[in-house]
Amino acid sequence: MQKKLFYILFLISSVISYGQVNLFMESDKAEYNGKDVVNLTIVLELNGIDLEPQTRFQLPDLSKFNIIGSGSVTNTLIDPATNTLVTQKVSRIALEPKKKGKIKIGSVLVTVNNKIYKTEPFDVNIKEIIDRKSLAGNMASEMYMNMEIEDRDVYQDQATFAVLKVYSKNMDNFRKVKDVRLPQQDNLNVHPISFSKSEIDPSGAGNMASQVVAVFMVFPNEAGYVEVPAVSASVTSYANKNKIVSNKVKLNVKKLPEGSPDCFKNAVGNFNVNVYNPSKDKIEVEKPIHVIVKVSGEGNLPDMHLPKIISSPDYEVFTPKITSKVVPGSTGMKGEILANYVIVPKKSGAIAIQTEQFAFFDPASKEYVDLGKKTLALNAFSHDQILESRTTVEKVNEYTNTLLETVNTPVLKTTTLKVKEKSKFHWNILLTNIAILVGLFLIYLVFKTWQKKRSLVRETASPKPLGSVAETEKEIRETLKTDINDYFSYLENLKDNEDYPKFFGTLEEMDQDVRKQYFQSSSDDFRTFLESYKGSSVAEEYRNLSQRIQMEKYSPLKSREGIEELLKAVVNLYSQISK
């Protein structure tokens, strides 16, 4: 009889102790359509002051879903019937199903006072999955992209401007538009102007707001009706990645007028051609020189054919290096294109370097402009003539340079001692150096006077003993020490005013100041420092509090009691750290 009574008492006590922890998980409904979001709610109730969760919620396998959002909130209250402290932690998870059918959701695990608790698994039924194409259709009904070209009647190779706008009923969709891809086609050249998004215009077409997402320049290179292909862009959300496509625009490209010069190729705009030698040195036969052909102006500058240097038996021409410096203009691309040629003269005397004839069509005047050939007159000298024309000083410099370049001494560097030709004496440099020396001398006199006065003061004053390294470090910490109580008062005011964004921002600022006080830059380094100097318990409490702050910061539901409990934990921990 006593054994049975003992067994009954043990069973009742186990049931009572089990009832102190209540863990369950449920969904908002049992059946879902493909467009519905599965909302899971996990609730942990702790009845008693001595119960403390040791782990977070350990979620089951959710690989058959896309996790699109989560949040948690902790509430603390006192049951008036039993006068017991009740702590309730609620977490919400939003899921998007990947396939249809019956899907099993497993158990959630949590450890409380060295005991593992788990929820019961259950099934949810997904009726159907919405196809991506239908999602794209819904996206198209909410927003669309339009390409606008105002001037659709242009000449061949003449620029016209295209503006790309996105229209949407929901302004939040504008930030999702990314990766704008401009059209590419053989019968037109496209040059981007800007991909910067403009301000949102709420007064769009059909009660839709609009935003400019791209501006570019189109150069059709053939006559007739030319269709500008559609521009595409991606619309990325947390669950889907769709694509929107703009309209196509047809251009009426007019053929260039008849009577073009024989040298005309495809230059349309307003241009100028210049040819020059950037060096001022004497030109020697069989020695290479640089000759630059510069085409400047505004029009189809990046796509037109440049005038070349005509070959001649007087010199040898090598393939040029092309350098372009162009920016968008009002009627086309403006700037300059440089063709840097390497020319090797083959004879001494006068040499005329000529370019090909160059002509362009000016759409403003609707006329062809023939610039003709551009000629650069040079005078080449033989090697003997170069030597004879040199002065005595230049010859000495030449001999010195030859000696320094050919004789390799262990001390001297030939390149550093090479004498420059035609060097002049710079009086400005001499005067500048004299002024610097005078200034340094005056600074030296002032310093000596100050040093004498300082030595007299040191003799009268008693010497102050130097402290140890630890004492010095303590003094530095005292100067850098943060008044933590000011932060506590400010956080209390923010908590009372329910200004939670500024509350968490002030928490981060206080944590940085405290870490700076101990010369620690990151949270991991500071936790290691606390473990060494404050003990492992303080370091572990700092880690748990940091995680708790992050969970409360990004929680969609914030309670006044939860924030107050968090502030008490912050005051307790940081008061210990700042002692």
Image (spheres, rainbow, N blue to C red):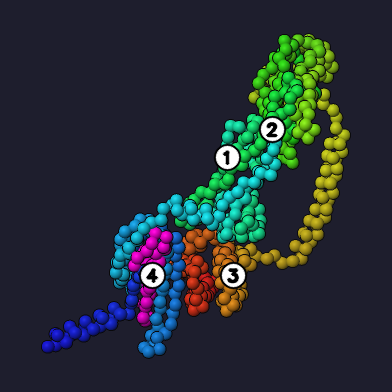
Residue 371's place in the image compared with 204, above or below, is: above
Residue type at mark 2? Lys
**Alpha-carbon neighbours of circle 4 within 10 Å: few (<14), some, or many (≥20)?**
few
Q: Nearer the viewer, residue 452 or 267?
A: 267
Q: Main secondary structure of the magenta part?
A: loop
Which sits in the foreground, 122 or 116?
Answer: 122
The label number, if any, that marks residue 502 in the structure image: 3
Cα separation, mark 1 vs mark 4, equals: 47 Å
Task: Residue under label 1, please give it.
Answer: 229
Q: Which mark is residue 28?
A: 4
The reply to whether the C-beta atoms of the residues labelled 4 and 3 are less than 8 Å apart is no
Residue 33, picture quadrant:
bottom left
Circle count: 4
Q: Position of residue 149 (x, y in %)?
A: 66, 44
Judging by the rendered image, the residue that carries numbered circle 2 is: 254
| Residue at figure coordinates x 74%, y 25% from the top left | 258
Which of the marked residues, 2 or 3, is nearer the chain's N terminus? 2
Q: Secondary structure at mark 2?
A: strand
> Mark 2 and mark 4 in contact (Cβ < 8 Å)?
no
Name the residue located 36 percent from the left edge and 88 percent from the top edge. Answer: 82
Q: Earlier in the sequence, mark 4 or mark 2?
A: 4
> Residue 492, percent across and down?
57, 77
